[in-house]
Image (cartoon, rainbow, N blue to C red):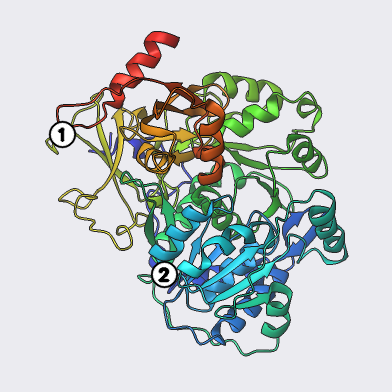
Amino acid sequence: MTVNKPWLDHYPSNVPKTIDPDQYGNLIELYEECFERFRFHPMSICMGVTHTYDDVDKASLAVAAWLQGQGLAKGSIVALMMPNVPQYLPIMIGILRAGFVCTPINPLYTGRELRHQLNDSGAEVIFIVDNFAQALEQVVGETSINRIILSKMGDMMGLKGILVNTVIRQVKRLVPKYALNDPKYKVTKFPDVLKAGKNLPHQAPEMELEQKAILQYTGGTTGLSKGAVLTQRNIVAAAMQSEAWYRPVTSEIDEVYINMVMALPLYHIFAFMLSLLGMRSGYTFILVPNPRDIPGFIKTLSKQPFHIFPAVNTLFKGLLDHPKFGQLNFSSLRISQAGGMAATEQTAARWLEVTGCAMIEGWGMTEGVAVGTANVVTDRQFNGTIGVPGPGVDVIVVNEDNERVGIGQAGEMCIKGPNVTSGYFNHDNSDSFTEDGYFRTGDIVSMDEKGYFTLLDRKKDMILVSGFNVFPNEVESVMLDCDAIVDCAVIGIPDERQGEAVKIYIVPADSNVTEGVIRYFALDNLTGYKCPRYIEFVSELPKSNIGKVLRQKLREKHMAEHG
């Protein structure tokens, strides 16, 4: 058995124990290698429209050239707020090829959430789909944004895009009215960026692996999201680690093109990592802009074979619950990767029965570019663990005194590797790492004698709704702005559909306060997955002698009442 790292003895023979990101001078070398190797491979399919690696290469160069002509300082932050549409990856890669830093934004953010990320990151430019321009309009005057690039969903779909844009705007009415006509910031249409950029010179910037590449925001226990600084080395390492881990299966797929279902939103770290893995291997991404439309999603899956299917447990279950899903052809499916939230044994068993492909569970975090631990991809049985550390990843488990614990003992999971962040942007990071440089995940785990880890508990108060982090402090601070609420506390409760759901206990201002008032305020101020699904009115909240709300008491109260 390998000393201190027993998991290495259980790696498949063709998976390396370490990787070397320093074989690349910078992240752009990795991207350009992919474009060169797979130039005429299809890179994305969206609503029946295909783009090759060559198409994306040229579009990203146009974006980069245009951005370089805007007079931005070196290292400037550029925001990207879009769903999974064909222009997402060309824009993101273009931002990096221009020498700037990208900060992806959840397009479902409310104005308040958007304002915080823009101000914390200091972004000066934002690429945004017009469906979400109204939220930007509400706050843009309070930010550093001075250039706005507006895109429509169908901007890179050719003639079909005209139909898509018409349906979205005039039939489904999914574009709320906005103006964005203040002269202090310049608004440009995305097609004009592509047109102008193609005729502008692109100067390859001097870059190193230690430079910032992505500011990826994640929930914070203070109630405000924090930007994890992901360097070019972090991202290159994650791409190499992921590609190596999947190799035992992908090397056996005897097909010209390997199709990966991309239903997870590209602004989420899990999907971003998968896009890197896919590009390194020349995969074609089946882009799904709205995976919540299950009938439409199934229709998309019926149009071409799919080999790799990453998703959160919620999405796997939603598909299984639809009667037409079982009618699809699963003969090409080789990997079903569960992540983002805990997978359930019931969903895993149903997935294997219906598709014939075992669901493989792993664990990752924003701060590690979604690479951490995973089960071996050739496994055929769901084992309930989060697997073993990936190539080049080291994990230790420590107790409250920062002492390493033994096999089978519970403690905090701490992680080190070339993919792990150096810390949070604009934050004191001294408490984020152990003295010997391991990142503190806050997750409670135990390790067995083989090096497989079991997740026992998560960060004390964090709620995981369909794979998205919800921190009670943030929800509470927002809800306390409601005049109908005197005091409140938020906990997570088990939910069969979402994994967990948000429950809020409220001390109302008077007896006339209704659930409807609370729900309306929440929907107006919080992203949908953060909104309380369950509301309970109470006369007082349990608190410590220093006035801190005892959420554990509320969890116990819920369990006592509901089991």
Q: x%, y% of residue 126?
A: 56, 69
Q: Say which quadrant the N terminus sits in.
A: top left
Q: CA distance from mark 1 to mark 2?
A: 36 Å
Residue at 46% across, 64% down: 118
Q: Secondary structure at mark 1?
A: loop
Q: Which residue is mark 1?
A: 400
| Pick the front one: 30 or 468 | 468
| Pick the front one: 65 or 281 | 65
Q: x%, y% of residue 143?
A: 46, 68
Q: Is residue 256 above or below residue 425?
A: above
| Pick the front one: 63 or 174 | 174
Q: Which residue is mark 2?
A: 122
| Pick the front one: 245 or 115 | 115
Residue 481 visible (yes or no): yes
Q: Say which quadrant the C terminus sits in.
A: top left
Q: x%, y% of residue 297?
A: 75, 40
Q: Secondary structure at mark 2?
A: loop
Amino acid under label 1? Glu
Q: Quadrant of residue 3?
A: top left
Decide which of tag 1 and tag 2 comes sooner along the chain.
2
Give neighbour class at mark 1: few <14, some 14-19, many 20+ (Cα, 10 Å): few
